[in-house]
Amino acid sequence: MAANEATDVAMPLPHVNGDKDKTAAAAGTTTPTNNDEAKAGTNGAGKRRRNKASSAIRRAAKRRHSLSKAARDPRDEPESSTSAKASVRTPSPTSGRGKASLSQPPSQPPSAAVTRSPSPFIDFDGLSRPSKGTRARLEENDEERAVRLDKMRGAVRTILECVGEDPERAGLLGTPDRYAKALLDFTQGYQQNVREVVNGAIFHEGHNEMVIVKDIEVYSLCEHHMVPFTGKMHIGYIPFHSVIGISKLPRIAEMFSRRLQIQERLTKDVANAIMEILQPQGVAVVMESSHLCMVMRGVQKTSATTITSCVLGCFERKEKTRNEFLSLVGVNRH
């Protein structure tokens, strides 16, 4: 009854803070005042800001990986927990006593370099995109290469027949073999990776001004029609303690261009690779090219030029730096 009486007395005057506190105390509960609510709201907002800042710091700390870290590839991912537990301990082939030992994961091939993307399907060199065949070619031996060439020769003969030609006539007898070898040469970038191309040519220097290699001739095959697109690439970066051998920039461009590509991705691949291995203040890549798929077919515009760019780091943040690069490579002609 005492609690009920206290409640009955307090109800006519709910707007009085003192009476409200007394009522809450009599009922065995606490009612926050306006000051308490404001303080709690301020503390909550401050806590959210601190958590957000901490998350940003953690993301910045791990935004880049080093070349020593393995790439994510679908075939390198661990098995499901059930099957993994069943295969944790396997007999060691070298123990000689049949004793069980912890199975060691197979050493990763050179193609597994580094992962920039959280996706497990794209590694640093692009060698797991879009099929297993890309890495299989990198790791093939002479016997596997011979089998690959034989399959390609048969495919070319089929194509010749389908377009209405006779693969047995004198002028086409050697075409299947020649074309198969030429196509493997056009796509030799699948047999390379950034680690091997750079070959340790990164040097610690005090230079912190812009470095540009321009007018790099690039030849690639459009992945849509498998006809060439050709042009020039301009690469620039601003060092942060380290510089790369200048010949390595054209070699990186060559590696990515010798694959089935689109110009937009090719530009981005080169920029991301340099940013990853060198970790400079910024990277800028511009490519100007002509596409035979627009010249020989379709719209048939012989004078059309396609320009793509990718800017990272300080080139992306600072307009003045970006404009300096574009002016030096001759893109800003107005």
Image (cartoon, rainbow, N blue to C red):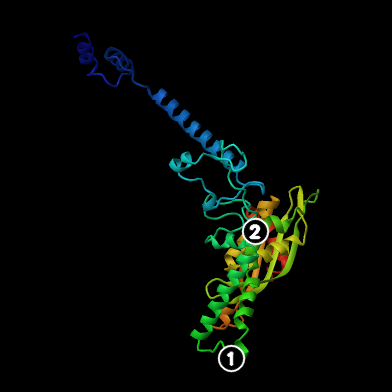
Rendered image quadrant of residue 193: bottom right
- Quadrant into which the C terminus falls: bottom right
Please tell me the numbered disc located at residue 33. Answer: none
Badge 2 local density, few (<14 within 10 Å), some, or many (20+)? Answer: many
Mark nearer the N terminus (1 vs 2)? 1
In this view, the residue in front, 162 or 216, is 162
Q: For the residue marked with disc 1, what is the amino acid? A: Arg
In this view, the residue in front, 148 or 226, is 148
Asked if the residue at tag 2 contacts the one at tag 1, i.e. Cβ–Cβ closer than 8 Å, the answer is no
- Counting from the top left corner in percent of width and height, residue 288 is at 65, 71
Figure check: 301 above or below 113? below
What is the distance, in whole Å, between disc 1 and disc 2 at their CAs? 47 Å
The residue to which callout 2 is attached is 271
In this view, the residue in front, 87 or 95, is 95
The residue to which callout 1 is attached is 169
* Front label number (1 vs 2): 1
- Quadrant into which the N terminus falls: top left
Residue sitting at x 62%, y 64%: 190
Rendered image quadrant of residue 263: bottom right
Residue sitting at x 61%, y 76%: 180
- Counting from the top left corner in percent of width and height, residue 119 is at 52, 51
Q: Residue furthest front?
A: 97
Q: For the residue marked with disc 2, what is the amino acid? A: Ala
Whether residue 44 is visible here, answered yes or no, is: yes
Residue sitting at x 75%, y 52%: 200
